[in-house]
Amino acid sequence: MSPPDTSSTTAGAHPRNWSLRLKIGIGFSGLILIMAVGMGITLFKLDSVKYTAASALEKRQPAANYFQRLSQNLNQAIALLNGYLLTGEPERKAEFKRITDNIADHLDGARQHDIFQTLGLDSTLETSQGLLQQFRAHAKELFTLYDNHQNNRGLLLAGETLNPQAIRFLGDINILLTSDDINPNDPQTAQALLILQELRYNWVRMMGVFNLYITTQNKEVLINFNNFNEHINTLMEKLNQLEVNIGFGEIEEMNEARAIYLARLPAVLEIFETGAWRADTHMLRTQVQPVTDQLQTIFEGTADRLLDAAFDNAEELTGALYQIRISAIILMTLTLLTGTLLAINFTRSIVPPIRRLMSAAGRVAEGDLNAEVMITSKDEIGQLGASFNIMVDHLREAAMNEQKMLDELETRVQDRTRDLEQSETKIRAILDNIGEGILVLNEDGRIESMNPAAEHIFAMKEKDSIGINSVLLIDEHDSEDAPGFIGIEVQSAGRTKTGNNHQPKEYRGVRSDGSTFPMEFVVSRMNLGSKHLLVCIVRDITSRKQTETKLADVQNQLVDAAHKSGMADMATGVLHNIGNILNSVNLAGEEIHRISGNSKVTGLLKASDMLLENHDDMENFLTQDARGKKLPEYFIKMGKVLSAEINSIQKESKELIAKTTMMKEVISTQQTYAKSGFHNEKLNLPELVEDALKIQNASLKKWGVKLDTQFANTPTCIGQKSKLLQVITNLIKNAKEAMSDNDQFNRPKELKIETGMANDTAVYLKIKDNGCGINEEQLTKIFNHGFTTKETGHGFGLHTCANAMTEMKGALKVDSEGIQKGACFTVTLPINKAA
C-alpha cells in the first residue's frame, strides 16, 4: 500500500483537495495585499510630517548636542585635574590642557557659526569663554602648588614643628636606656629605667596615633591620643619625683622637648580641624568649584532650552500622527479579521483529519494493530494518513516476526543459563581461595556475601555477616567520612563505567571482637540484570602502617630540624634556583650530545682510510681515481662542517661553565648565612639585599616580576645576619605573592627595593609592590600573631619578622593606600656608630 500521488492536483480542482501550501499561499497573499495598501497610506502621511520634524533637527538639535558635548568635556577636564592632584601623572596634566584647549576652540568656532548666531547664543558663548579662562587660571595655580609640594600645608607644619621635638624626646630615652654608666642595682635607678621603658613604648604609640589622626581626622583617634598624653604626663611626674642622678641632663632635655611639643601641638591641630591643611582641596572647594558649577549650569541649561524648543514642534506633529495611528488601527483590524477567517477555514480542513489520525494512533499504542485512518482528502494530511496505514501494516508484520524470534531466544536463554551456572561455580572457587578479602554489597551498603579471606580479616563468618550494614565494619571516627562504608567510592564507580581500577581508600576497620585495624579497599560497580551491586576488595595494611609511622617520625624530626635552623625558606629558594639552572645545564648537555652523535667525523675517518690504502700511489689516486679526485673538495667542506660543530660545542660548554658558576654562587650564599650565628654584627645592607635576591631571583623571573633596585651608599648597620636575611627573604616573597592577581587587572608586576638613610642613627630598606594592597582595618593588625589574609597562611611570618626586628633594636612598618594600590614594607636598623 502506498500514499496517493497528488502532484497532478491543480487549482481548478475542489478546494478540499488543494495542497496545504496552496491554501496557505492564497491566504497569506491576501494578508500581504491588505498590509501593502495600509503601509502605502501610512508612508504618504509620514512624508507630510518630514518637513516639520526636519526644522527642529537641523538647528536646535545639533546646537543642543554641541553644548552637551561641551558639558561632557568639562566634566572630563575636572576629573583630570582631580586625578593629577591625586597621582601627579604628567599624562593627566597634558590631557587636561588638550581638553580645555578643545573647549576654548569649540566656543570660538560656535560664535562664528550661523546656527548659533541665528539662535541668539552669542552672549551665552561670551560668558562661557570668560568662565573657562577663570577655570584654566585656577587650574594652573593648582598645578604650581602640586609641582612645588606646597599642597599639604598641614603635614609640612607638623613635620617642621612637632617631629624634631618628638625625635629629641625619644632619642634622650634611648640614650638613657642604653647608657653603660647607670647602675641598675640601685632601687631608684631600676624604677627609673622601668618608667623610661614605659615612656618609650607610650611615646611611640602616641606618635602612631597622631599620624593616624592627621591621616583620617577621626575624633575618636584624637581621644586616644589625649589618653596616651595624660599617661605620659603621669609617668614624667613620677620620673621627676624620683630625682635620680642618671645621664648628663637627658631628663631635663626630655622635659624641655615635651614642653615645646605640647606648646606647638594646638596650632597643628587647629589647621587640621579647620580643613585648610590641604591648600589644593581648599582652593578646589572655594574657587574652582563655583566657576565650574556656573559653567556647567550654562552648558546644561542651554542644551535643555534648545531641546525644549525642539520638542515644542511636537504639537504640530500630533494631528498627523493621530491620523497615522487611525490608519494603523484600521490596517491591524482588517489584518486581524482576515487572519481569523483564514484560521477558521484552516481549522475546519485540518483539525478533523488530525483527530482521526490521533485516535488511530492511540489504538495502535494500546496494541490494536488493525486500526486504520479514513482518507477524505488528497492534501498533505491525507498523504500522512495513508502513510500511517502503511506503517500499521508493517508493524503487524514486525509483530509476527518478533514473536517468532522470542520463541528462538527462549531456547537460547535456557542453554546460556546452564553455561552461567558452570561459570559461577568456577568464580566461587577462585573467590574462596584468593588472598584478599572480597565483600559484595547491595545499594544500601548491606553485606550480601564475603570470601574466606574477608572472614579472616574481620574475624567473622559469612553467615553472620549477611545483611549487616557495612558501616558497622568502620571505626566510628571514620564512619562520617564513608557513609554506607563506600558512599564516596560509589560516585567514583558510577563515573568509571569501563571498570577501570580506582585509587585505594584507607579507613580503620572493626573486627567482630571490637578491635580496630588499618585497612585499604577498592570499590567497583557490578550490575546483575536490574540489580546493582558493589564489590569491595579489602586489604589488612597493619604492617605497612607501622612502617609508615616509623618513616613519618623520622621525617617529622627532619622537618623540625629544618624549622629550627631558620633557613627553610632560604633553602627552598636555593633549591628552586638550582633546579632552574640544572634545567639549562641539562639542555646544554643534550645539545652537546646531539652534536657529537651527528658529527661528520665518521665520514672523515673513512676518507682518511682511503688515503692510507693508496699511500704508495697517492698522486695517481688523487688525479686519476674517481673517488680520489673528490677527496680534496670533500676535506675542504668537512673542515667548515667540523669548525661549525666545534663552535657549537664551545658555545654550549661556555653555557655549562656559566650555569655551574651560578650554582656555586647561590650555594655559597646559602652556606654563608647557614653558618652565621644569631649574634649582632656589622652588616652591609645593600649586599645583604643582593644575597636575598640571589635566592629569590629565579622565582621572581618565573612570576614575571619586574625588579627595580636603588641602593644608596649607606654606612654599616648592626643586626643578626641570618635573621635579617630571613626577614628580607620573607618580605620579598610576600610582595611577589601579593602581585599574583595583577594579570586580572592588566597591571604589570613591579617590585621596587630601595635602601638609604632614615636619619642620623638608622638606615632603612623599603620593599614596595603594586599588588593587591591592604585595607585600613588590616593595617592595624597585620603584625598580630595568627593574623593572615592568605587562604593557606598561618599568620606567623610577619609577626615573626616584626619580633626579629624588635630584637635587633630595629623596626618594621607597612604603608598602603588601600585595596589594589600596593603596599610598602619599611625595615629600619641602627647604624654602626663606630663606622
Image (cartoon, helix red, strand yellow):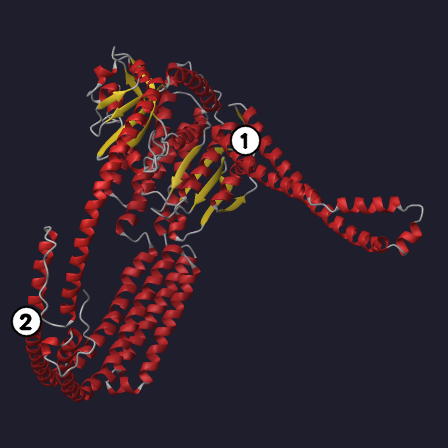
Badge 2 element: helix
Q: Which labelled disc corresponds to residue 832?
A: 1
Q: At which x and y percent is residue 757?
A: 50, 40
Q: Quadrant of the N terminus?
A: bottom left
Q: Nearer the viewer, residue 524 or 473?
A: 524
Secondary element under disc 1, as helix, strand or loop, is loop
Q: Indicate the quadrant where residue 522 lies.
A: top left
Name the residue rendered at 32%, 45% in the picture. Answer: 215
Residue type highlighted by circle 1 = Asn
In the image, residue 820 above or below residue 173: below
Q: Is residue 41 above or below residue 558?
A: below
Res. 450 visible in picture: yes
Marks 2 and 1: which is nearer the front? 2
Callout 1 crowding tier (Cα within 10 Å): few <14, some 14–19, many ≥20: some
Residue 491 pos. (x, y %):
28, 35
Quadrant of residue 319 within the rendered picture: bottom left
Q: Residue at x 69, y 47 (%)?
A: 648
Q: Nearer the N terminus, badge 2 or badge 1? A: 2
Spatial separation of the CA atoms under disc 2 and disc 1: 108 Å
- Res. 348 mark: 2
